[in-house]
Amino acid sequence: MWKQVTAGLAATLALGSVGVFAYKGIAPDTSLDEAIGSAFKQASITLDQQQINLIRNQVAGAVETHCRFSQGNSKVDFAAVEIAQALQLNPKLDQSLVGRITGAIETIAKDTHQCQALANRDNRRITEPMVADESWEDYFNQTIALTGNRQFLDLVGQKQFHPVKISWEDIGRYKNSVWGDRISDVGIWVRKDERQPDSAQLAMSVRRDGNFRDKVLVVPADKIKVHTKSGSRTLEKTLPQRLQELGLTSKQHDKHVIVSNQFAVVPVPSHQMRDASVAGKPPRAAFNFSIYPYGSTNFVITDVIEGSANAIVGPGNHQLLYADINGQKAPFTASRAEDRPDLLQLEKQLKAQGMDVDVQRYYLIQIPLKKEATSIGLSNMGEPPNRHYYYPDAPPMYEAEEMGSGNVAYDMAAPMPTTSAGGMLKTQKSAAAKPEALRRNGPGLTKVAIGHGETEGRYNAGSGYRGQRAEEPVRVTVVYFVTPTGEITEADMNAFAKAFEQWDNQAIWGGSFVVKDEVAKN
C-alpha cells in the first residue's frame, strides 16, 4: 500500500511548484487520501472525505516543505495553522493542535519515503541541513560579534570611523534630528547556512561617520555606473541614462547624487572550514541587504560585478533585496576573492573595455518615488529573521554619541564578547590566514568577491513605477566587502581611509546635511 501512496504523492507534488500552497488543480488521489486520513487519525483528528478534499493541496505542499527544509522548520508550522483553519479548528483553544497536525505531515513524509523521492527527483540533498563545522561556527559568531570587541572599536575609533549593525541611509532628514520625510535603515544579513535563510544574522559595517551626523558626499551622477545584461554581454550605463530607461528621471535632481561610503566586514569561510556552503561551489557565505524606508516608497537598484537588479520597497518593515537571476531571486554571496577566479577574470575583462567595475563593491541606489502615487506595487520578496532587531517594540538602535559609551550603533540585546582583537581570530589564523596577514602591522582583512547563490523563487521587481519619480535627490550607498583572515590592524584602517579618499576626490562637496559643522568642498 505505501508504495502506491508514495507514487501517488510524488505525482501530486510534481504538479505543483516549489513554493508552499502552490498546488492548484490537483486531481483526487485515493492512495494519498488514505495516507492523509491515516496520519491525521494517528494525530487524533478524524477526517471525512470532504475534509480531506479540502486540505489535500495544503498537505501536499506542507510535506514538500518538510522535506526541503527539514523537520522543525517554521514554514511547516505555518502550514499546520492554515490547515487547522481550513478544517475550522481553533489552535488558540487547543494548544496541541498545531503540533499534532505537524506530526501528521511528518508521518506522511516518513511512511511514504517522500523526502527521498523528492531528493531523487531534484538530484540534490534536501532532507536535512548540513551541520557546520565548529571552526566555521566560531569564526562566524566572532566576526558577527566584532561590534563588541573593545580593541577593534578602539582601532576603528582612531580614524573616527563608526561600526554599525544598522546604517541610516537617508535622503531627507530634519536638521539636528533623527526624524525626516525620506529616511531609510539598511542592514546586511549573512547566513550561517546558505540553505537556511532564518540562520542569517546582522553583519557589521564600518561607516566613515556616525549615523546621526551622517557625513555624505555630493557626486556627479554620471560617475555612478549601472550594469545590465544582454545575453552574456555586460552593458554599462551612467545612472542618469539608466534612470531615463526606467522612466524615473527628475527635472531638477539628476545632475548629482548623495553618496555614503562604508566597508562591510562579513564572515566568509575558507577551504579549511567545513562550512554550510552548497556542495561543489567555492566556499562562500550567502547574504541579503535589507532596507526599511520609513513612511516613503523607493525604487532600489543594486549593482555588483555580475549586473544589477531592481526592486521597490515601501514603509512597514525591513524588506530583503536579492539578485535577479533570469527572473528568479537568489541571495548574494561573498567569497574570498582568490576563490573566485571567474569573477576576477570578469573584472579584468570589463575593465579592459573601459568599464567601472569592482568585484568587492555593492551599490545600493535609492530613487525616491512620489508619496501620493497609488499604482505602485512593492516587491515584497521577504523579511529578515530576528524581528526584534528593528520593530518598534524591540530595544532601539542607539548611537554612541547619544549613549556616551563607545562608538558603535548596536542592538541592546546583542552579545558583547570580551575577546581581544588578536584572540578573536586565533582559529582562523591557524586554519586559513595567509602568512603575510599574520604580521603584526600587516592587514588582517582580505578582499571579497560578490556573486550570487542558488535561486529561491520568483523575482519580483515591483510595478507601476514609471513616471512616479519624486522631485528629490538619489542616494547611493557604496559598500566594499572584506572578511577577516588575521589580526585586524591599523593597515586595514588605512585601506578604508584610502578608499574613502578616492570618493572624496570625485565629490563637489562633503559634509553633513544634518549637523551644520562642515564647509563646502571647493
Image (cartoon, grey):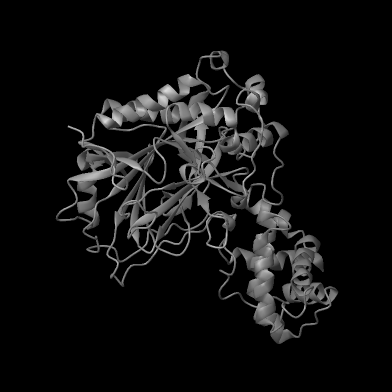
In which quadrant of the rendered image does the N terminus lie?
A: bottom right
In which quadrant of the rendered image does the C terminus lie?
A: top left
Q: Is residue 306 left or right of residue 198?
A: left
Reply above or below: 517 against 439: below
Residue 90 location (% of width, % of height):
71, 81
Query: Nearest the camera: 186 or 232?
Result: 186
Q: Is residue 9 left or right of residue 367?
A: right
Query: Nearest the camera: 41 or 284?
Result: 284
Query: In this view of the protein, can residue 473 be seen by the observer?
Result: yes
Q: Residue 472's quadrant in the figure?
A: bottom left
Residue 401 location (% of width, % of height):
46, 42
Query: Nearest the camera: 35 or 517?
Result: 517
- In the picture as drawn, the residue positioned furthest to the left comes out as 251
User: Which residue is drawn at the image coordinates 34% and 30% (left, top)?
Assistant: 500
Q: Is residue 216 left or right of residue 205?
A: left
Residue 89 location (% of width, % of height):
72, 82
Q: Please give the count of numbered marks on the rendered protein.
A: 0
User: Which residue is drawn at the image coordinates 56% and 38% (left, top)?
Assistant: 285
Residue 372 location (% of width, % of height):
28, 70
Query: In this view of the protein, can residue 118 be seen by the observer?
Result: no
Reply above or below: 73 against 501: below
Query: Nearest the camera: 407 or 439?
Result: 407
Reply above or below: 184 against 282: below
